[in-house]
Image (tube, helix red, strand yellow):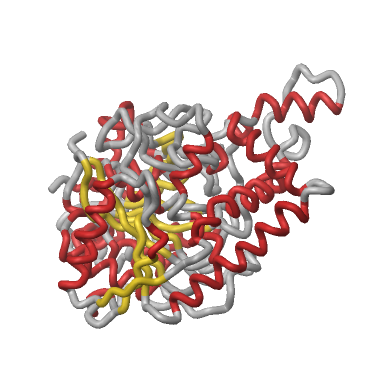
Amino acid sequence: MDLNQLTIKEAHQKLSKKEISSLELTKACIERIKKTDEKVHAFLATDFKNAEKQAKEVDKKIKKGEKIKMLEGVPCSIKDIIITKGIETTASSNMLRNYVPLFDATVITKLKDNGAIILGKNNCDAWAHGSSTENSDFGPTHNPWDLDRVPGGSSGGSAAAVAADQIIYSLGTDTGGSIRQPASLCGVMGLKPTYGRVSRYGAIAMGSSLDCIGPLTKTVEDSAILLNIIAGQDAKDSTTPPRPVLDYTKNLDKGIKGMKIGLPKEAYIDGMDQGVISSMETAVRDLEKLGAKFEEISLPNLAYGLACYYIIMPSEVSSNLGRYDGIRYGYQDKEAENLFEVYTKSRAKGFGAEAKRRIMIGTYVLSAGYYDAYYKKAMRVRTLIKQDFDNALNKVDLILMPTSPRPAFKIGEKTNDPLTMYLEDIFTVTINLAGVPAISIPCGFVNNLPVGMQLIAQQFNEELILQAAHAYELASGWHKIKPKI
């Protein structure tokens, strides 16, 4: 096995036993990036020199016999919407081109405190607006399984980097499926924690009541390891509650015998890929062999989730992007002749088409005369959706659903039809609206393209979905299959 293919746990064990050095591991990932990223385009910025310097310091500690932390000396990457001190952070938008932050997001501080080595920033849809990473102002990322296809989005660069073994793990953000959907399309693990379980401080806001930071990893155990580190209350983020952080690795091996898993009857829709349906049916049978019990449940308002999400989310986008006006933040057009032109020309040139589309939709539904008709109704539907999940999860331990209705589609296939693109999020947006945790794990292949399924639990019950996902992962072995790139 090449060193860049290691998991967090494997890398930590080998480093601790002095079987490998951090510099060897870091250089293996750097070489992999240099060899493959011209094809994949998962990275927008790199920090190789500093990474090698950090690796040498870790090796000195190991040589002295000092104990190292779990992430110490292990290379990673970060979605370009999470603030990193000293490394360019653009949200993949021309509006923030060349912006180098002077501070770290809370999750980055936690990673650094644990010794993580950050190799660079991953491409994403600009401002995290998208399901394919085609909306990046710096060009699309390509799926390592088929370079003519999308990796999903908006955390497509992070998912592709993990799938291509360019790094050991990555952090992404999930507003309506932006960790889970690319995880599904790239055949890796993608965990969306409970809203508020992980601090959002330092994540460039998209939808403030929906955004979550979470890991993209090669194994479920790695996701649990990372959640141990990044979860917890943060004084800089008032939405993080004072709940204790569990050891999410503690019960991973308990299995799923006797667990009740609900199958929503509304989760299979017209136009869904038959291969995805077959993969889900096979996964259900495999989970039954492991001792899980299934029963049909109903999420009656699931069908309204997409319409609800695409009213609430653009409203929050409109508010959050208002600050990028060429005066307070962001690109400033030098040809503007007055203050009004500074605003209009800077925003016209700084924002891409999808950002403008969402700003206009959000501003419209929040405007006088339309607020009650659209936004207020959407918030009422959101309450009903949350109640659906609460009611269902009072009857069963977990809910099983597809992550995406189809495997990765070709680059350019949906760019001229935004509504069709939005449908890619049909199985993921309701989880963000309800604020519950979910994980996407590989469950098969369709025409050599990965398929993922998601397990969903009650709020702050990440421990249970990780336990179930780990049992299925070990039994199925889908995560061991690698793209040939």
Residue beneath the point at 57% across and 52% down: 203
Image height of 216 relative to 468, above or below: above
Q: Is residue 415 visible?
A: yes
Query: Between 381 and 329, which is closer to the camera in this rendering?
Result: 381
* 246 on left or right of 331: left
Where is residue 473? Give x, y as percent: 22, 63
Where is residue 52? Give x, y as percent: 34, 43
Q: Residue furthest front?
A: 270
Residue beneath the point at 37% across and 49% down: 404
Q: Is residue 52 visible?
A: no
Where is residue 210? Give x, y as percent: 57, 58
Query: Between 402 and 345, which is closer to the camera in this rendering?
Result: 402
Image height of 36 relative to 192, above or below: above
Residue beneath the point at 30% across and 45% down: 273
Tell how many labels.
0
Query: Between 473 and 342, which is closer to the camera in this rendering?
Result: 473
Quadrant hosting residue 186: top left
* 426 on left or right of 307: left
Image height of 207 relative to 352, above or below: below
Quadrant hosting residue 32: top left
* 114 on left or right of 366: left
Where is residue 127? Give x, y as percent: 57, 41
Q: Which quadrant: the C terminus? A: top left
Residue beneath the point at 43% across and 40% down: 122
